[in-house]
Amino acid sequence: MILAKSAGFCYGVRRAVDLARKTAVESGGCWMLGDLIHNANVVRELEELGVRKTTEPETLGEGDTVVIRSHGELKHVLDGLEARGAACVNATCPNVCRIQKLVAQSEQEGRRAVIIGEPHHPEVMGLASWCAQPLVFSGPEDVRAWLAEAESNRDIPLTVVAQTTCIRELFETSWEIIKKECTNVKIFDTICDATHKRQSEAAEIAGKVDVMVVVGDRKSANTKHLTEICMRSCPRVFQIEDARELSPDFFNGCHVAGLTAGASTPAGIIKEVYATMSEEIKAAEGKEESFEELLNQSFKTLNTGDRVTGIVTAITPTEVQVDVGAKQAAYIKLSELTDDPSAKPEDIVHVNDEIETVVVRVNDVEGYAELSRKRLESIKVWENIEQAVEDKTVMEGVVIAENKGGIVVSVKGIQVFVPASQSGQPRGADLSSMIKQKVQLRVTEVNRNRRRVVGSIRSVTEEARKAAQEQIWSSIEVGKHYTGTVKSMTSYGVFVDIGGVDGMVHISELSWSRIKTPSEVCKVGDTLEVYVIAFDPEKHKISLGVKDRSIDPWEVFMNKYSVGDVASVRIVKLMSFGAFAEVVPGVDGLIHISQIADRRIDKPEDVLSEGQIVDVKITAIDEEKKKISLSIRALLAPAAEEDSEEE
């Protein structure tokens, strides 16, 4: 049995189902307009979760939550839901959303939209509603008929798009006619990459098997197309909805069977069909095969595009001979082994090495096949990129250039365009500063035919920040210490990033010393050691401190000074009755106005200013009230004061 790797849910369908499940749980029940996807089993499951189905959107309004299906919806239906106050969750496939925008844009540009696809399919009907006079063609015959209606049709400006699940051959044949006959045409290849991959793989497998089984709902357009494609290469093709429809008669005389499934077929159904097919095939095996038949089956049948693994049997200066278990002799030209023209084959591979390649040409008449390792590596890179879109894989690359609207990142040799809005940099930032930087990104769009890849750095950084925030909030506690970075400053404190979450350090918690502005002790970008004073998970607020609470400033003062000692202090506040001065950080003393000078003064600012450093004598300490009396005058005229005390 051969099971297609691409069988089953595509990204758009998986996203729609996940959104519907999540919405049903969060809202306590919601609506879908018709079937969310074309699969009865999934629709039944969603209905059990509380996703109710209706075909009358006009009955929904304020208080209702509606999940828009993966195929998209008629524009006037969406407008009506919005006008009535219904909450819409858009589960439309991103690829379909892109085509909707292209169709709407074509009308704004004065062009007429041409949609190649099934006229009565929900996706096509929805697309057609995004402009006033769309042209919907089911294939090249419809195109030719429209062109024959009037010569003037050839002069109409056209924008051509395709249903996402359209058969590629049908689309290409249609637009080639339009491109040849019409004078002003814009063509957008909007066939889903996953659909194209699934169709190509189905065709490849169908050409190798005796029986092909296609699993999917009978209303599913992409499943129907898979069946049509398989019928071109395999004489016995069966389309079923689930394992119950399998019959042992399907596999009479079958040696090799193939299995694929539409984009809306759940993995559970595919697994069940695969298991049942295996049993049916075993039951159908009833004859002994001749030695000649077994010998013939032991040889592979090579076709162009096949991936084959073989053993290196000989190496010459111009080629490498490989045994791939086929009737044909197989070899790799040096130019298909490496891009380095100076390289020698024996430096790259050795006899008896196992090597994976792709077949690029088969000559059955002369009995040989040409292989390529270089092309296979390129195919693998593109497949990895395409799979990265499906799996939302984070990839690493290097920024190699800045261009109009964004930057270019090299990922495994593939150039990925990252729009400025997805670069993770502030709006208007100089993106050239990112050149040569290593970055992590997600690939969001791939078009292998046009060699176009689009990615997002922002989605990765935002996800990392969110994960860091969740980690902080799950482990935060009062007294816990963090190393943070000053992000911004205000007159009343600073905001510090402690790893994805910002906390606020009030100015009073920045230093034991009395300060007027935070800029006296730190600046934006500084690293601070902070600890949690308090936090509120509901309001997402954190109060932080910098001052070391294990230190008692009063004890520091008492261990350092006594009455009669001289200290160098900083004036921190001027009052009408005197001046407060910082003796040690966190401990202030009072210089009474009578002790500021050796003469009478009207106010302290006549002699002192805030921030000034002066020498004082400690004249009294009140340990109970933690008050200190200081004197400048005592240092200016000590002898006079002593005489006065003796009298």
Image (cartoon, rainbow, N blue to C red):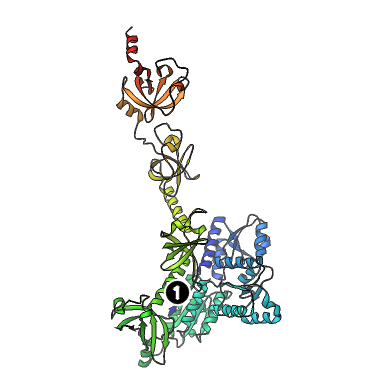
Foreground residue among 34 and 109? 109
Describe residue 355's horizontal placement relative to residue 592 as left or right: left
Q: Give percent across and percent down for residue 221.
A: 57, 75
Q: Type of residue at label 1? A: Lys
Image spot of residue 290 (x, y percent): 37, 92
Name the residue nearer the viewer: 128 or 492: 492
Front residue of this view, candidates 535 and 151: 151
The quarter holding residue 3 reads bottom left
Residue pictured at 45% horizontal, 67% vertical: 415
In the image, is residue 562 above or below residue 384?
above
Task: Decide: is 465 above or below 182.
Answer: above
The quadrant holding residue 110 is: bottom right
Which residue does the numbered mark 1 point to in the structure image? 5
Give the side of residue 473 with respect to residue 168, left or right: left
Query: Residue 184 placed where, x, y %?
Result: 64, 74
The quarter in which the C terminus is drawn is: top left
